[in-house]
Amino acid sequence: MVQAFILVQTEVGKAAAVANAIADIAGVVSAEDVTGPYDVIVRAEAGDVDELGQLVVAKVQSVNGITRTLTCPVVNLG
């Protein structure tokens, strides 16, 4: 199982709608509106890195109102 945080920037005024739409995508554990340089932080999980990539590119990035994403895979260092 691969987990990742996906940091999302949205168009002005679209954060809530984007978070709600992303929350309904299979593989998304949570999607929260936040303040700061990113507007939404998503926690996602997938079976492997390729599946995670497909989740981000084919599903998350297709949500209307997203301008940029940054995917941060979770690593276990010890």
Image (cartoon, rainbow, N blue to C red):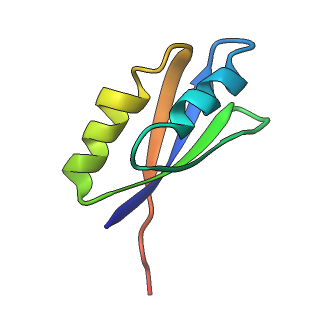
Count the marks.
Answer: 0
**Direction bottom: furthest residue:** 78
Q: Horizontally, is 33 left or right of 72 in the view?
A: right
54 or 37, which lies in front?
54
Q: Is residue 16 found left or right of 5 in the rendered image?
A: right
Residue at image position (72%, 12%) is 12
Nearer to the camera, 15 or 23: 23
Against 43, is 18 above or below? above
For the N terminus, which image quadrant? bottom left
Give the quadrant of residue 19. Answer: top right
When asked about the image quadrant of residue 4, the answer is bottom left
At a point 32% along the width and 39% down the height, the residue shown is 55
Whether 23 is drawn above or below 62: the answer is below
Name which residue lies at 42% across and 77% down: 76
Give percent across and percent down for residue 32: 68, 42
Which image quadrant: the C terminus? bottom left
